[in-house]
Amino acid sequence: MPGRLIYLMGPSGAGKDSLIDAARQPLSALGCEVARRVITRSAESVGEEALEVTAREFEQREEQGDFALSWKANGLGYGIPVVIDSWLEQGRHVLVNGSRGYLPKARQRYPDLIPIVLTVDGEVLRRRLLRRARESLPEIEKRLQRNQQFSSAKWLDEEGVVRLDNSTELETTLEHLLGILREHGISAVPDRI
């Protein structure tokens, strides 16, 4: 049986990178790979473990078919390497750091994906964004507004997205993530081909 794509979304500052890092070992035990994104941003930026490329390199990779999924958001290009298709065919599950705006297209390509949105309380997010000091105060306010959109129950219901709250301890969020995956049938390493 093919593996499942786990499509994790959430606003900047919600803690996706921290959750993904904490989940690597438990996910591996479930037969799940974590895809490393290709992003067009400066090498000085901090955050997820991604392969950073120039805008031109990104375009070339897109033209060559190097990405299973790719999109543009916030002035940046994001790509998920095409190797995920091989992993899925081999029965491995794959977690990707996705985009809410790209979810419909991702669903077209991977109809059985598991969409999960990481949400966080507005005040918790404000503290995290201020602490990391990557953005100006007006940019932080825009992030907070976007967080409210991500937390909208209407959107979650319409799109059939599972909500995962990360307002408390990371370990608690990780346990809830693993519980969600178990509910979707991801609980053991599949047979290797």
Image (cartoon, helix red, strand yellow):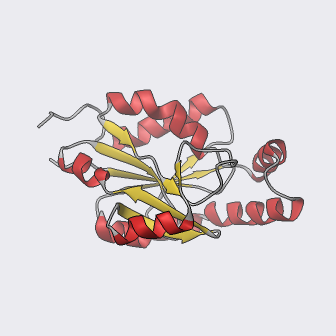
In depth, the one of 29 and 52 nearer the eye is 52
Q: Position of residue 47 (x, y in %)?
A: 64, 44
Res 184 seen here: no
Image quarter hosting the C terminus = top left
On screen, 69 above or below 178? Answer: below
Image quarter of residue 146: bottom right
Res 127 seen here: yes
What residue is rendered at 49% in x and 58% in y? Answer: 98
Q: Position of residue 141 (x, y in %)?
A: 82, 63
In depth, the one of 104 and 131 nearer the eye is 131
Q: Is residue 136 left or right of residue 45?
A: right
What residue is rendered at 48% in x and 71% in y? Answer: 158
Q: Is residue 124 left or right of residue 172?
A: right
Which residue occupies the extreme left position in the image?
193
Q: Position of residue 138 (x, y in %)?
A: 86, 65
What residue is rendered at 30% in x and 39% in y? Answer: 186
On screen, 101 above or below 67? Answer: below
Q: Is residue 150 left or right of residue 131?
A: left
Image quarter of residue 62: bottom left
What residue is rendered at 54% in x and 70% in y? Answer: 72
Which residue occupies the extreme right position in the image?
137
